[in-house]
Amino acid sequence: MHATSNFSTKKVSFSAIFSDFKQLTKVGLSLSVVFSSLAGYLLAVEEIQYTTLVLLALGGYLMVGASNAFNQIIEKDTDALMKRTMNRPLPTGRMHVSMALVVAISFTILGLAILYSINPKSALFGAISIFLYTSIYTPLKSITPLAVFVGAIPGAIPFMLGWVAATNDFSIEPGMLFLIQFFWQFPHFWAIAWLQYDEYKKAGFNLMPMGQKNKKAVLQIIIYTVCLILVSIIPVLKITGNFYIYPLTAVILVFLGSTMLFYAVKLYKNQTNKEARQLMLSSVLYITLIQIIYVVDKFLH
């Protein structure tokens, strides 16, 4: 009976540790970044190299996991002030900072080594992403809403990273992929900032445009959403090198973007959390679908 109890405790303990590890590295977010990287890779290649694909997925996952772990180490005390984050491993004391640091550093070294094994440029962009997210974006969050602009840079790297991994080249095509995901960050993140406004305030974060939760802020969301739609269809003009799309694909993308724009306009009119949540969910759907659509379009050429 005693042995069974010990086994049960070990099982529960392992399960709890694994759960904390997933929270520290934000598994869901990390997997969405891996998805973006793989989409970028598929857009670039003529013939899929499955070894590179696996290395890219693993390196990308470790890169984002490291950034998230460093972020939670730095924001341990502010995370304790917000309902959304107070149950994370570090604020609750379930995980010691030194253990989180071991995870973050190990993920950084291993992730960058894996990306370097693909090619040096991939490792360089991975390193830039971790540095910007950890050393500039995270500290800026408590100082200025401009932190969102800085955070959009590492947030936009994964999509283009796939192309760089495939070609060991940074030119107009990965630059275009970067631009698409860069503009997407603003309506997406500001919708979250609207929903979390009071919680962020408790932690000393004010991330809405110009620091206000009002119509002026939503106007910024609308402007960036329009920019996102326009940037997403630029490849139809065939001025972006080997990255181009069919006119029908551009029409589909405009339709998808219009859904985001619809919710942004509704948010402008009503200024409620319901519309902010709809905008946030539609933005996630948009970035996922356009990456799939780009890849399907590419293989139809």
Image (cartoon, grey):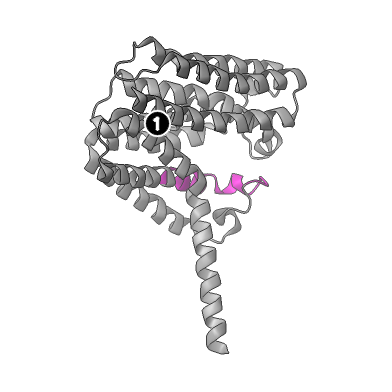
Q: Amino acid at mark 1?
A: Phe
Residue at 24% x, 30% y is: 167
Observer able to see residue 107:
yes
Q: What is the quadrant of residue 220 in the picture?
A: top right
Count of residue discs: 1
Q: Is residue 80 magenta?
A: yes
Q: Which residues are magenta?
A: 66-84
Q: What is the quadrant of residue 237 in the picture?
A: top left
* The one of 86 and 204 positioned closer to us in this rendering: 86
Depicted 240 relative to depicted 65: above or below: above
Q: Label 1 belongs to which residue?
A: 159
Quadrant where the C terminus sits is top left
Pick out the residue farthest to the front: 300
The location of residue 59, given as percent across then percent down, is 33, 45
Observer able to see residue 26:
no
Structural crowding at the residue carrying mark 1, measured as other residues with C-alpha within 10 Å and reported as few (<14), some (14–19) or many (≥20)? many
The location of residue 76, given as percent across then percent down, is 55, 49
The location of residue 274, given as percent across then percent down, is 73, 31
Q: Main secondary structure of the magenta part?
A: helix
The location of residue 22, given as percent across then percent down, is 50, 54
Depicted 248 relative to depicted 106: above or below: above
Relative horizontal placement of residue 132, taking residue 256 as reference (left or right): left
Q: Is residue 279 magenta?
A: no
Residue at 45% x, 22% y is: 180
* The one of 261 and 133 positioned closer to us in this rendering: 261
Quadrant where the N terminus sits is bottom right
Residue at 45% x, 46% y is: 70
Relative horizontal placement of residue 129, taking residue 286 as reference (left or right): left
Give SS at disc 1.
Answer: helix
